[in-house]
Image (cartoon, rainbow, N blue to C red):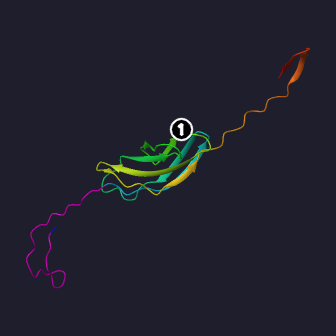
């Protein structure tokens, strides 16, 4: 970049400056926004989020999703796209989630926290009514 002075925008009134080197500093990316529940089951959550709008000047390599159960340590899950299915979860349990983007300079800050719950366990299938096959003095044989 070189600077110059002009009285009308066209005519130089002073010589051009020495060249200036401007270097743009890259930084870790800004946090993604709005984690959304796409699907859930008794033992899984499928979540998505909006990609970060500020990648810090470098390509986002992957995302890290922090999943915090109510009674345990947080677990970090990695995803290359802004969508993840997390399995082997506890049924009918609330989890706090946060996500952050990672570029070659490192991890950006965590997003706001969102809370999602796994689904309810389904009731067992209804069994047909039993019928009496045989009755003895101290026992009965039933089938269904």
Residue 71's x, y, as percent?
A: 52, 44
Is 15 a magenta residue? yes
Q: Is residue 53 above or below residue 74?
A: below
For label 1, count other residues whose C-alpha is less than 10 Å away and answer few (under 14), some (14-19) or many (20+).
few
Image point 46% across, 49% down: which residue? 82
Q: Main secondary structure of the magenta part?
A: loop
Left or right of 40? Residue 15 is left
Residue drawn 15% across the image and 82% down it? 6
Q: Where is residue 43 shown, x and y percent of the image?
A: 58, 39
Q: Which residue is mark 1?
A: 87
* Vertical side of 108 occupied by 123: above or below: above
Element type at mark 1: loop
Residue 86 x/y as whole percent:
51, 41
Counting every numbered tag in the picture gives 1
The stretch drawn in magenta includes residue 57 = no
Closer to us: 135 or 40: 135
Furthest residue in direction front, as rendered: 138
In the rendered view, tell whether residue 7 sits above or below residue 29. Answer: below
Which of the two residues, 32 or 130, is positioned nearer the viewer here? 130
Quarter assignment of residue 3: bottom left
The magenta segment is: 2-27
Q: Quadrant of the N terminus?
A: bottom left
What residue sits 18% from the left and 84% below the top?
8
Q: Kindly give the residue lying farthest to the bottom in the view shown.
A: 7
Q: Nearer the viewer, residue 78 or 121?
A: 121
**Which quadrant: the C terminus?**
top right
Asked whether, in this view, residue 4 is left or right of residue 89, the answer is left
């Amino acid at each position: 970049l070189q600077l110059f002075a002009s009285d009308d925008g066209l005519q130089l009134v002073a010589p051009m400056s020495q060249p200036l080197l401007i270097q743009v500093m890259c930084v870790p990316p800004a946090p993604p926004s709005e984690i959304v529940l796409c699907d859930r089951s008794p033992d899984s959550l499928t979540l998505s989020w909006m990609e970060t709008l500020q990648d810090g000047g470098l390509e986002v390599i992957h995302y890290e999703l922090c999943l915090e159960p109510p009674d345990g340590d947080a677990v970090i899950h990695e995803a290359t796209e802004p969508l993840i299915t997390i399995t082997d979860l506890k049924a009918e349990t609330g989890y706090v989630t946060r996500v952050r983007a990672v570029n070659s300079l490192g991890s950006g800050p965590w997003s706001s926290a969102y809370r999602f719950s796994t689904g309810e366990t389904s009731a067992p299938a209804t069994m047909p009514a039993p019928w009496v096959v045989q009755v003895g003095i101290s026992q009965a044989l039933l089938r269904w």
